[in-house]
Amino acid sequence: MEMGLGVLGLAPAVFWSLTPRELQAILRGKFGTAGEGSAPTRAELDALMRQYPDCET
């Protein structure tokens, strides 16, 4: 709501009538796609789990 009403300045009726996909398209158009990427691979997850184990040693 903060993005739609505050940052984008949409009227409440317009904001509430948007579908999630429409809101996402508006946000991408305004701010780009920074921070989006593919999910990590299994090998990347395994490396992270070795580097940052959940248990204390």
Image (cartoon, grey):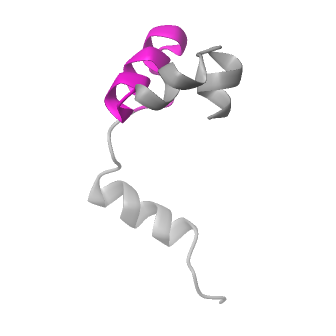
Number of labels in the image equals 0
Based on the displayed image, in which of its 4 quarters is residue 7 positioned?
top right
Query: Please, is residue 25 above or below residue 21 in the view?
Result: above
Q: As drawn, is 52 to the left or to the right of 48?
A: right
Q: Residue at x 47, y 70 (%)?
A: 49
The furthest residue to the left: 42
* Image x and y of residue 35, in percent: 50, 30
Query: Please, is residue 15 above or below residue 11 in the view?
Result: below
Q: Residue at x 48, y 14 (%)?
A: 32
Q: Residue at x 54, y 14 (%)?
A: 31
Based on the displayed image, in which of its 4 quarters is residue 4 positioned?
top right
What secondary structure predominates along the stretch shown in magenta? helix
The magenta stretch spans which residues?
18-36
Of residues 7 and 14, which is closer to you in this image? Answer: 14
- The verdict on residue 34 being magenta is yes
Of the 4 image quadrants, the one containing the C terminus is bottom right
* Image x and y of residue 12, in percent: 59, 25
The furthest residue to the top: 29
Of residues 28 and 48, which is closer to you in this image? Answer: 28
Query: Please, is residue 24 above or below residue 55 in the view?
Result: above
Of residues 36 and 41, which is closer to you in this image? Answer: 36
Q: As drawn, is 50 to the left or to the right of 56?
A: left
Query: Please, is residue 18 above or below residue 9 in the view?
Result: below
* Image x and y of residue 27, in percent: 49, 19
Q: Is residue 34 among the parts visible in the rendering? A: no
Q: Residue at x 35, y 23 (%)?
A: 22
Of the 4 image quadrants, the one containing the N terminus is top right
